[in-house]
Amino acid sequence: MCAEIPDPNENPRLWKVVTETMLHGQCGPANPSAPCMRRGRCCFGYPKSFVEQTQESDEYSYLIYRRRNNGRTFSRTEGGFVYDNRWVAPFNAWLSLTFDCHINLEICSNITAVQYIYKYVYKGPDRAEIVIVPAEQEPPNPNEVQEYQRGASEASWRILQFPMHKEFPSVQHLPVHLPNQQQVTFDETGNIMQVLATAMHT
């Protein structure tokens, strides 16, 4: 894991990927109308502080990554905004070089990581349903059960203890056996020669 601008001389390809895809911003006073701005501040906390060593955070479950003030900067042509290590999103060099795109990674070092993962596993797709019906076409007796099922929130679904997912595997047992070890069903009152002949052809 890294959150610094790579050396363009040692690894020019990684430097290109990071400077093109892993720099956050510009936001803050330089761009108050950026999508990440909430109440005058970046909701992701950029620019971060310069830190000499990676360390744990008492407030959040994410680590505080090493972002040294080593003088390494990058400036895009538009606007002339100068990026330094405070604007780098955490990345993994191998993944960045392999996929050549924005892949933001975070190391979760707190028990709240379990809550975060659980939330995304059971999050489900975003959905909304809007139906516009003229007053003269509105049914006199609306189907309240159907309307509830369509618009029930996850919270109410959990309060009523409805299942969130199927709890049984969709597995079908196949009659696979080793050679000459298949099960043979026969009538014990039948002819033994017929039973043997049937078993050999099974």
Image (cartoon, rainbow, N blue to C red):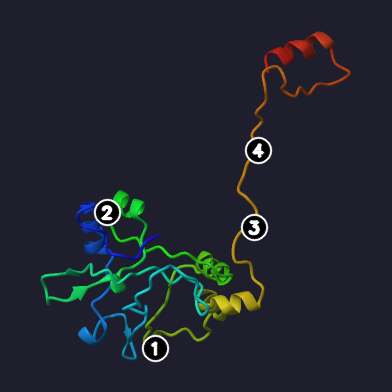
User: CA–CA distance between discs 3 and 2?
Assistant: 38 Å
N-terminal label among 1 and 3: 1
Tell which of 50 and 124 is nearer to you. Answer: 50
Q: Mark 1 or mark 2, which has the lower sequence index?
A: 2
Q: CA distance from mark 1 to mark 2?
A: 57 Å
Label 3: few (<14), some (14–19) or many (≥20) C-alpha neighbours in 10 Å: few
Identify whether 4 is placed above or below 189. Answer: below
In this image, 67 relative to 158: left or right? left
State the CA–CA distance, disc 4 to disc 1: 55 Å
Q: Element under label 2?
A: loop
Residues at badges 3 and 2 in contact (C-beta under 8 Å)? no
How far apart are labels 1 and 3 at the CA level? 45 Å
Cβ atoms under marks 1 and 3 closer than 8 Å: no
Q: How many marks?
A: 4
User: Horizontally, is 174 left or right of 191 in the view?
Assistant: left
Label 4 sits on residue: 173
Could you tell me how far apart the alpha carbons at marks 2 and 4 are, in whole angstroms? 43 Å
**Residue 100 tag number:** 2
Query: Which quadrant of the figure has residue 96?
Result: bottom left
* x then y, percent, for residue 18: 26, 61
Disc nearer the start of the sequence (4/1): 1
In the rendered image, residue 49, in percent from the top left (x then y), is placed at: 35, 78
Mark 2 neighbour class, 10 Å CA radius: few under 14, some 14 to 19, many 20 or more: some
Q: Which residue type carries mark 3?
A: Glu
Mark 4 Cα shell of 10 Å, populated few (<14), some (14-19), many (≥20): few
Q: What residue did someone put label 1 on? A: 136
The type of residue carrying mark 1 is: Glu
Q: Which residue is mark 3?
A: 167
